[in-house]
Amino acid sequence: MATAAYEQLKLHMTPEKFYVEACDDGADDVLTIDRVSTEVTLAVKKDVPPSAVTRPIFGILGTIHLVAGNYLIVITKKTKVGEFFNHVIWKATDFDVLSYKKTMLHLTDIQLQDNKTFLAMLNHVLNVDGFYFSTTYDLTHTLQRLSNTSPEFQEMSLLERADQRFVWNGHLLRELSAQPEVHRFALPVLHGFITMHSCSINGKYFDWILISRRSCFRAGVRYYVRGIDSEGHAANFVETEQIVHYNGSKASFVQTRGSIPVFWSQRPNLKYKPLPQISKAANHMDGFQRHFDSQVIIYGKQVIINLRLGVLHVGQKLEEQDEFEKIYKNAWADNANACAKQYAGTGALKTDFTRTGKRTHLGLIMDGWNSMIRYYKNNFSDGFRQDSIDLFLGNYSVDELESHSPLSVPRDWKFLALPIIMVVAFSMCIICLLMAGDTWTETLAYVLFWGVASIGTFFIILYNGKDFVDAPRLVQKEKID
């Protein structure tokens, strides 16, 4: 049994310190954070000043350093997902980002703007649905791994024993991680999807749980993070576990997905489907081998097994169980939607087929709508989204002493001039059609001139597409030869 994290917390604030009080039965611990020195210490309840401003919180996500100094991130709202094996699972639904500093007067105008942008990046990630935690159960490990651990492992705190691939606030918790005495205040938080259902087949009741864990190694948005890195981590890797709990018996079936494990990229360039590019310099077999070697080490030999645990009769098929099949298909569709929103920015495509087994007119319309939204986000907002993820996960660290802000990227004349020219030319083409000239040939000449000008400008923009997309600024993504 892992050492549980504190579940009931109060945050007390004074101008000098943050005090996080453990309110569980019998607890007397208070985590103290000095807002000036940033020192983290352990105190007791009597040390909290009566003048402190107090509010309830539901967990500490961690701390991060921005231009203005350090910030404390806390969970302010949660909803209960359900229970399994007598452990409550929560979804974190709201957060607060609290500055250690009492004033921003020490910042220049440029620093103030940069700090505001970094805060917007943090809030962007926090507003993406899908952060889950438990104060008593280790959500980062599969049931299979948890059933094959040593007594020493089982006595560790949730933070110590967590699988770092799936602790999305691992970077934010680095200061608390270094001090074992405060580990009960630290919550490993999962990003992905969890759903639980109580089901019945043949009059036998069982729990069916679906958990998807997004890896924080090589995480990112759809086009800016593809393939693998030098360590063999596949982009946007997800571990999905199905658990069946029936009559005291438990079974777990684990699947994984990730980007094609070779060195490749697919940078957005205004085209609907940018061409993938394979690296000419990288050793693909070495990276491929590293990826699958790690898969075997972590997951062992991969086999297919039957998990229904005696719930189904001999010869019965799952497809024949209408009530359970509906729950099953809808849960998988919800899982696909959640994971797709987290990395592509929209819900998954073809979920109507997943839910019903056939394509529907509404499903086709929704796929078209999602495809348009994806196109816009992939080209005009994914740079910001990728920067947000890199900042949150610690792939980029803010240095307020840096002479040049990475957020200030000058645009050349093409970025401003060409779109204006195209819009003006297209508008003039429409005006010429609506306000005909003295003769038909004069009108046609004007329409042809402005039409050719707008189409020509469009193709020039398309040719220089990489100059017009929203690219990441904080971490230089790999360049392809």
Image: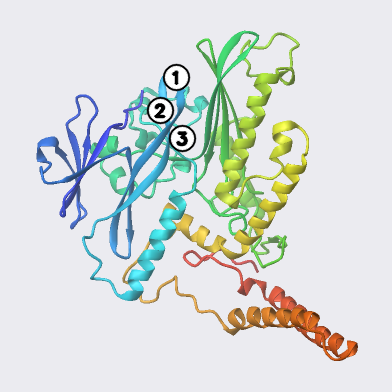
Picture quadrant of residue 407: bottom left
Q: Name the residue under label 2.
A: 137
The tag earlier along the polypeptide, 1 or 2, is 1
In this rendering, does residue 144 appear at all? yes
Q: Which of 239 and 96 is in front in this view?
A: 96
425 relative to 260, above or below: below
21 relative to 319, above or below: below
Whether residues under marks 1 and 2 lie with C-beta atoms below 8 angstroms apart, the answer is: yes
Residue 361 appears left or right of 480 = right
Amino acid at circle 1 = Phe
Indicate the secondary structure of the residue bearing disc 2.
Answer: loop
Q: Name the residue under label 1.
A: 85
User: What residue do we see at 39% from left, 34% from top?
Assistant: 161
Amino acid at circle 2 = Tyr
Give coordinates of residue 305: x percent, y percent. Answer: 66, 21
Mark 1 Cα-neighbour bin, 10 Å: few <14, some 14–19, many ≥20? few
Mark 3 Cα-neighbour bin, 10 Å: few <14, some 14–19, many ≥20? many
Whether residues under marks 1 and 3 lie with C-beta atoms below 8 angstroms apart, the answer is: no
State the CA–CA distance, disc 1 to disc 3.
Answer: 15 Å
- Residue 140, labelled with which disc? 3
For the rendered model, the colour scheme is: rainbow
